[in-house]
DNA sequence: CTCGTTGCAAATGGTTTGCACCGCC
DNA sequence: GGCGGTGCAAACCATTTGCAACGAG
């Protein structure tokens, strides 16, 4: 499963004449295996442990590259930064405005809804690629914390 | 129509004990009357003409405030910045990855779809507020430009 | 009158870039 | 072996903040 995504991603890199470097491999692997919507810093901190001398600049540059190739999507975080998500299949994001956590919501209907939304953009001559669909609000944990204050 | 949105916004400010200053009035008015999804800089440049001595910091601070009050939503721009949109009614955004333009797409079905998506987040105890729904891709004009190269 | 807000300028810090070295293809 | 990619550090610039003056309630 994971391998399939990884292999497809590698294929996409090759198709675009992008060299496959160890740095690119571990960044992609991390994004595929984790659905925690990491920030750039999180990615760097985790990977730097097993891959010393990794540069923050490399992480930034490659995230930008992956985004351009539509391998990943960039989600705006409430605390003015971005979070990254490997784009394997369309899913819904619930973004907590208090703790900035992003929750994936998988729903059988969602693929159809996303397709419907993409089709709507085609009515104005738009050529859709990926979607970025977030609902803002307050997560369960933060609601409880607020109630207990 | 516009007045109604403006009046509601003012009411919301009062409810939250936020002072109504001329700066806040013109920024909100601009966002209500324009659906061009301006950047902070655009807002500043336009408003500074009729309201000299307006400070960039004031625009930033107030956009942040309005966002916290859910009066506006923040849309990530491809060129790593944000664009702002008065949140009067839910609508779909088509974001061009080439020219960074954001197109509003009004569709009679959309309100229902948005409600459906919000309900899906409730299944995990989430309390939804506003939505930020964008489809990325390439707009009609940019497709033509690319074809003519 | 009071205290939240503004404008200015300086500080901040996340992100990008220049460059020499490295290593993938 | 060539050239795209990396690491490092410096540069950049969008955004935030400190502070004195201002003005909305």
Image: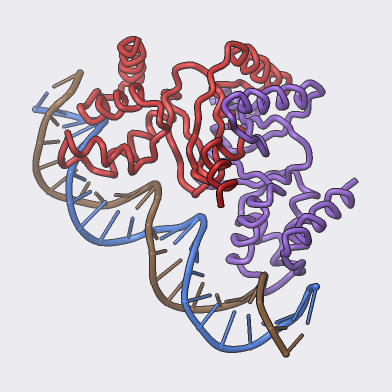
Chain colours: A red, B purple, C brown, D blue
In-image side of A107 versus A33 (left or right): right
Q: Nearer the viewer, residue A110 or B140?
A: A110
Q: Nearer the viewer, residue B28 or B50?
A: B28
A96 is higher (above) or lower (below) than B57? above
| Rendered image quadrant of residue B26 | bottom right
B90 is higher (above) or lower (below) than B84? above
In-image side of A146 versus A119 (left or right): left
Q: Nearer the viewer, residue A37 or B52?
A: A37
**Rendered location of residue C5, percent (x, y):** 67, 70
Is residue B51 visible from the viewing direction of this image? Answer: yes
| Rendered image quadrant of residue B75 | top right
In-image side of B102 versus C16 (left or right): right
At 78% from the left and 29% from the top, the residue drawn is B106
Identify the image quadrant of the N terminus of chain B. Answer: top right
**Rendered location of residue B101, percent (x, y):** 63, 38
At 33% from the left and 22% from the top, the residue drawn is A33
């Amino acid at each position: 499963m994971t391998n399939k995504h990884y292999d497809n991603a590698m294929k996409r890199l090759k198709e675009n004449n992008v060299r496959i470097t160890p740095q690119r491999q571990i960044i992609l692997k991390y994004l595929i295996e984790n659905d925690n919507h990491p920030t750039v810093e999180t990615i760097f901190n985790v990977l730097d442990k097993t891959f010393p001398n990794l540069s923050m600049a490399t992480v930034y540059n490659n995230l930008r590259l992956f985004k351009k190739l539509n391998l990943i999507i960039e989600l705006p975080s409430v605390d003015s930064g971005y979070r990254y998500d490997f784009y394997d299949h369309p899913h819904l994001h619930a973004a907590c405005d208090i703790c900035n956590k992003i929750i994936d919501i998988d729903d059988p209907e969602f693929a159809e809804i996303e397709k419907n939304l993409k089709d709507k953009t085609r009515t104005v001559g738009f050529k859709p690629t990926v979607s970025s669909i977030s609902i803002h609000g307050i997560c369960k944990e933060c609601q409880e914390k607020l109630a207990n204050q």
